[in-house]
Amino acid sequence: MLKKSEKFIDYGLIAGGILQLSLMGSISLEKGFIKIISTQQTGHIFLDKVLKNLTEGGGLIEEILRLKNELKNLHDDLEELLISRGIIKREENTLLWIPLSERIENVNYAYEKEIRNTLRALVLRGFKNDVSFSILFSLTHDCHLLSEVFGSTSEIADAKNWVKNPKKLVGIDEDLAIILGLISHFFSDKLPK
């Protein structure tokens, strides 16, 4: 993971999980508070853990902070998910059957490239896509990963301007804009730089 985002990425993943559960209809976010609509499993190891551990009526930011401390195997679960989908692979280096090191390798760069291209098109060409990409774009900004998606300084500046007015993004209504604003405020003001 990039050094500049390591302090933020876990919070971003948890926020993304909560927002995905909202898109799926498992929960609703009413004025920044969580209402659990269904506890039915989603079939997604990470989302199921987030759903199982959410507190009814909990504030969104408080739940992100609490889940960060509670979900200890967050990276392991996501790593297994990405391996099972053929996006990454785990590789062990051995010497005489003794494991020396283990590393993770991206084996399906096309998947990552498609996501980057969609995010770029969303901002640079006004491409209309799914609301989930608008949310992903906002979280990419919050986690200090814009430079991984946008190449030049002017593109990054354009992306930052889009974040300032999330209602310009596809599928972002007033309520979701408020939620994304709460999350952005949390990332910019509450987390250590």
Image (cartoon, helix red, strand yellow):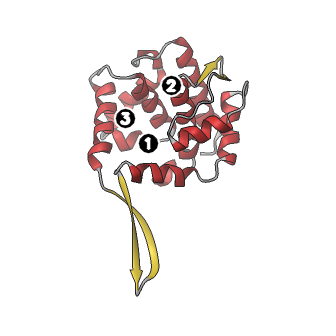
**Quadrant in the rendering for residue 124:** top left
**Quadrant in the rendering for residue 134:** top left
What x and y, as percent, mark residue 141? 46, 35
Badge 3 element: helix
The residue beneath circle 1 is 145
Mark-to-mark CA distance, 3 and 1: 10 Å
Q: Give the mark nearer the N terminus: 1 vs 2.
A: 2
The residue beneath circle 3 is 156
Q: From the image, which quarter does the C terminus lie in?
A: top right
Type of amino acid under label 3: Ile
Q: Are marks 3 and 1 in contact (CB under 8 Å)?
A: no
Mark 3 surroundings: few (<14), some (14-19) or many (≥20) residues within 10 A = many
Badge 1 element: loop
Q: Residue at x 31, y 19 (%)?
A: 128
Type of amino acid under label 2: Met
Mark-to-mark CA distance, 1 and 2: 25 Å
Q: Residue at x 46, y 15 (%)?
A: 167
